[in-house]
């Protein structure tokens, strides 16, 4: 079979579903391809920062989100060994003041269902296994897990929202990264009956890694963390043949606050893991792979819990630009002009967050940084300031497609923006 759409989105995570909802609501004929069946658990700290609540409202899922999510996150903590300190999280001035947490099995399902409700065609569980550019169209090859089943779908615009923890969907662009001791592996588990104060978001710092703990919906807590490859190797040797999840749990229990929270708690499901993850910016556009959004475009160290923000807000920025140039794009014109504008918007919105997150991650993982603890204890407001520079108090750059005209007024002329050209293969 061959179907043709205005836009095809690869991936039904927060970035992909947000893009599909926005374009479908604006009248585009959209398809979304998601390789996993939903609901599915996913490695993530599951904190949704306050600026995104307005976006969830704009997407039409705000009320359902509020009904399912955990309590508002009003305080941040820092747990390192036996040391603990707490500070206020910054309030967002306009809109919902605080973020909340919700399991990805629920959030992603909610968003994908909304895209479908608005008319997006959802191919699930299907994977995009290749994409090519032919006669101004993107021609994508899809496959299911069932051997031999495949389909071809064409679209004027291709949106790559496949995340960053799985290989590129483009055949021939998949690269095997060399192994580094500094590679991060990410883990997550959920627990019932854990003792964590509602509204508190503790950041966990330990040698070779960092993490976070939060109360989400249904009384479950989520613990998620990143561990360097070398630290994980050491922890697994200490765990004497135990699973990676057990070794990570031992590492986390070196924080007194984690021991206290998990005392008497019951784990729900297994420890999930992904990796290696490599935070940083990637190519935002290329002729064959289309426009990247979410982690496919760039990823901040998860210590700030800003990945969902960047994924959703990035999708708003991209769709605003696509909608502005809709007629040109759908008639097969060149896409590099839109790519320039989107890249500019993206850099302005997220480049600083990526840098701050890298700094905080480096501090959290290094034993030498513990020397800063007395300073933080004396001025806990520094933690609040860290959350502000990390983006927790910044309103989303665009909250509806109709604001795109204003967004373009703020931009410099196109001629001064550089065309992003690095191919996805180099990600
Ligand atoms: C330990 C950890 C903790 C974190 N905690 C937080 C937090 O508290 N708050 C926060 O905001 N962010 C957090 N993040 C970051 C956040 O999880 C990511 O930034 C976010 O999931 C990115 O969303 P996305 O839609 O770009 O990608 P994803 O959520 O990864 O979605 C990509 C989707 O694409 C699908 N896919 C992949 N390849 C294909 C293909 N070829 N064809 C079809 N479908 C495909 C996948 O199945 C997946 O569903 C954390 C990350 C880690 C590692």
Image (cartoon, rainbow, N blue to C red):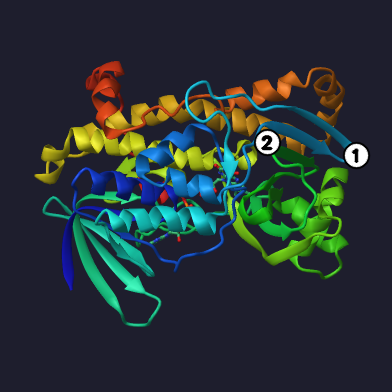
x, y percentage for residue 166? 48, 58
x, y percentage for residue 125? 39, 70
- Residue highlighted by disc 1: 82
Q: Is residue 10 above or below residue 315?
A: below
Question: Based on the displayed image, in which of its 4 quarters is residue 361 positioned?
Answer: top right
The tally of labels here is 2
Q: Are marks 2 and 1 in contact (CB under 8 Å)?
A: no
Query: Whole-Å distance between the Cαs marked 2 and 1?
Result: 19 Å
Q: Residue furthest right?
A: 82
The residue closer to the viewer here, 36 or 197, is: 197
Residue at image position (84%, 44%) is 257
Residue at image position (74%, 39%) is 202
Q: Residue furthest bottom?
A: 147
Secondary structure of the residue carrying numbered label 2: helix
User: Quick one: label 1, few (<14), some, or many (20+) residues within 10 Å?
Assistant: few
Would you say residue 290 is visible in this rendering? no
x, y percentage for residue 311? 44, 42
Q: Given this view, does label 2 or label 1 mark the residue nearer the observer?
A: 1
Left or right of 158 on screen, residue 368: right
x, y percentage for residue 347? 42, 28
Q: Which mark is residue 361?
A: 2
User: Quick one: label 2, few (<14), some, or many (20+) residues within 10 Å?
Assistant: many
Left or right of 92 on screen, residue 155: left
Question: Based on the displayed image, in which of its 4 quarters is residue 153 positioned?
Answer: bottom left
Q: Is residue 202 above or below residue 245?
A: above
Q: Is residue 349 above or below residue 284?
A: above
Q: Which mark is residue 420?
A: none
Would you say residue 196 is visible in this rendering? yes
Q: Earlier in the sequence, mark 2 or mark 1?
A: 1
The residue closer to the viewer here, 55 or 345, is: 55
Q: Is residue 325 above or below residue 25?
A: above
Secondary structure of the residue carrying numbered label 1: loop
């Amino acid at each position: 079979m061959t179907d043709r759409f205005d836009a095809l989105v690869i991936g039904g995570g927060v970035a992909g579903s947000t893009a599909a909802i926005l374009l479908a609501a604006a009248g585009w004929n959209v398809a979304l391809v998601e390789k996993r069946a939903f609901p599915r658990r996913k490695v993530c700290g599951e904190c949704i920062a306050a600026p995104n609540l307005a976006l969830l409202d704009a997407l039409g899922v705000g009320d359902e989100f509020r009904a399912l999510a955990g309590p508002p996150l009003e305080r941040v903590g820092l747990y390192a060994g036996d040391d603990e300190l707490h500070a206020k999280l910054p309030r967002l001035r306009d809109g919902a003041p605080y973020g909340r947490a919700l399991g990805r099995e629920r959030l992603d399902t909610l968003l994908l269902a909304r895209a479908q409700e608005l008319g997006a065609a959802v191919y699930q569980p299907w994977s995009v296994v290749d994409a090519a550019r032919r006669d101004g169209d993107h021609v994508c090859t899809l496959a299911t897990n069932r051997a031999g089943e495949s389909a071809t779908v064409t679209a004027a615009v291709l949106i790559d929202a496949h995340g960053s923890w799985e290989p590129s969907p483009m055949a021939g662009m998949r690269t095997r990264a060399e192994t580094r001791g500094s590679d991060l592996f990410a883990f997550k588990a959920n627990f019932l009956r854990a003792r964590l104060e509602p509204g508190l978001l503790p950041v966990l710092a330990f040698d070779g890694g960092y993490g976070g703990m939060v109360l989400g919906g249904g009384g479950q807590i989520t613990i998620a963390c990143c561990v360097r490859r070398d630290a994980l190797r050491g922890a697994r040797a200490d765990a004497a043949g135990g699973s990676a999840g057990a070794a990570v749990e031992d590492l986390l229990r070196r924080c007194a606050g984690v021991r206290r929270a998990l005392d008497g708690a019951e784990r729900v499901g297994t420890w999930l893991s992904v990796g290696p993850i490599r935070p940083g910016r990637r190519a935002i556009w290329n002729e064959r792979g289309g426009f990247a959004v979410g982690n496919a475009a760039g990823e901040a160290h998860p210590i700030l819990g800003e990945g969902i923000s960047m994924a959703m807000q990035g999708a708003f920025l991209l769709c605003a630009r696509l909608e502005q140039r809709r007629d040109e794009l759908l008639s097969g014109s060149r896409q590099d002009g839109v790519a320039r504008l989107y890249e500019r918007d993206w850099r302005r919105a997220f480049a600083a967050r990526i840098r701050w997150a890298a700094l905080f991650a480096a501090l959290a993982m290094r034993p030498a940084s513990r020397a800063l603890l007395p300073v933080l204890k004396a001025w806990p407001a520094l933690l609040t300031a860290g959350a502000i520079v990390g983006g927790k108090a910044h309103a989303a750059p665009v909250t509806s497609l109709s604001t795109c005209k204003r967004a373009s007024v703020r931009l410099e002329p196109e001629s001064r923006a550089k065309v992003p050209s690095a191919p996805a293969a180099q990600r």
